[in-house]
Image (cartoon, rainbow, N blue to C red):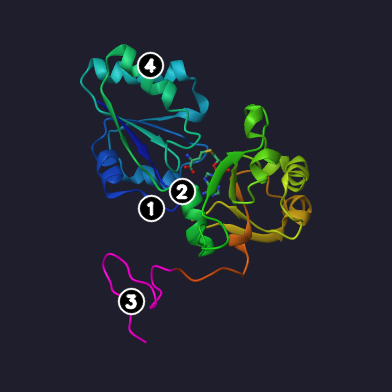
């Protein structure tokens, strides 16, 4: 059996209770050493066999899993954040299906949620944006043309950019081309929920300069949109003049 486990965004106690239990039971752990907090390995049992996937190919990961399966061992494949976001898990699922190896998935706290907590932010503010776009700038990995930054920017929704910290010059240009005002607020969160987390605040117009001057080149999220600013409407859900399924409006 293979358990795909989301490690959470960084802080060692942000893994789920289920994820920690699976780690503690695993005979073999293949972990994404480039991004997962190594302290999480302290949950593993003493004789657990540990492999760092940042040094491995897909084929090598599968080989480790196959060997473990052959002797009835349980493997945890530990991914950063939640494995559904840029996790390269689908190719592993399909290969395991072909090999007839059973697996399941344990969700994790994605870094975009960890970053919102660090920022004390709400991505879906009434009258500001009710949509969160999760995307990345095109780098070595291409992005389909229909999802160009400029076309997504035309919605002026909340945008969370993964894997884009080294591409801010082009990113800034395309965000503006697409429709964000230069004054649109931006937050850059480096290593959200880790001990050495850093938060930068700027605007779309000053994004490239801010990131360049900070020296941050990776492990950061760029969050763009009015939700990083000061203006919004309060919710109807908790408005005394508004009835919901669970509460009548207050008579005033
Ligand atoms: N599955 C992960 C994302 C993996 S892609 C998740 O759900 O978070 C790797 C990218 O995620 C990094 O380049 C960076 O953009 C972002 N990232 C991962 N952990 C982060 C963290 N703690 N703080 C900020 N960004 C992070």
Which residue matches tag 2?
Answer: 9
In the image, the residue with mark 1 has its CB under 8 Å from the nearest atom of ligand 1: no
Q: CA distance from mark 1 to mark 4?
A: 29 Å
Q: Which is more N-terminal, label 3 or label 2?
A: 2
Q: Secondary structure at mark 1?
A: helix
Q: Are marks 1 and 3 in contact (CB under 8 Å)?
A: no
| SS at mark 3 in the image | loop
33 or 1, nearer to the observer:
1
The disc placed on residue 51 is none
Of labels 1 and 2, earlier in sequence is 2
Q: Is mark 2 within 8 Å of ligand 1?
A: yes
Give the residue number, with chain letter if any, for mark 3.
249
Check the picture and name the quadrant holding the C terminus.
bottom left
Q: Earlier in the sequence, mark 1 or mark 4?
A: 1
Residue 95, labelled with which disc?
Answer: 4
Q: Residue at x 73, y 44 (%)?
A: 178
Stretch in magenta: 236-252
Front label number (1 vs 4) = 4
Query: Reading the chain from its start, which is encountered first: label 2 or label 4?
Result: 2
Question: Is the Cβ of the residue at disc 1 closer than 8 Å to that at disc 2?
Answer: yes
Q: Which residue is mark 1?
A: 14
Q: Can the viewer see residue 194?
A: no
């Amino acid at each position: 059996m293979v358990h795909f486990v989301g490690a959470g965004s960084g802080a060692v106690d942000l893994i789920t209770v289920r994820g920690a239990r699976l780690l503690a039971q695993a005979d073999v752990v293949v972990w994404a050493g480039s991004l997962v907090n190594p302290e999480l390995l302290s949950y593993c049992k003493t004789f657990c066999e540990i492999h760092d996937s940042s040094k491995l190919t897909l084929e090598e990961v599968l080989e480790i899993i196959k060997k473990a399966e052959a002797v009835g061992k349980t493997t945890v494949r530990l991914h950063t954040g939640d494995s559904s976001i840029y996790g390269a898990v689908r190719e592993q699922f399909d290969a395991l299906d072909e090999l007839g190896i059973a697996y399941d998935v344990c969700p994790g706290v994605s870094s975009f949620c960890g970053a919102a907590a660090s920022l004390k932010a709400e991505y879906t503010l009434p009258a500001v944006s009710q949509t969160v776009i999760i995307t990345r700038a095109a780098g070595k990995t291409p992005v389909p043309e229909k999802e160009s930054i400029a076309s997504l920017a035309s919605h002026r929704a909340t945008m969370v950019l993964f894997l884009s910290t080294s591409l801010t010059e082009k990113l800034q240009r395309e965000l503006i081309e697409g429709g964000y005002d230069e004054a649109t607020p931006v937050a850059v969160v480096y290593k959200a929920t880790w001990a050495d987390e850093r938060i930068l605040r700027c605007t779309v117009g000053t994004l490239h300069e801010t990131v360049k001057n900070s020296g941050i080149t990776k492990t950061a999220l760029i969050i763009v949109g009015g939700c990083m600013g000061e203006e919004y409407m309060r919710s109807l859900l908790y408005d005394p003049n508004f009835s919901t399924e669970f509460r009548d409006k207050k008579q005033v």
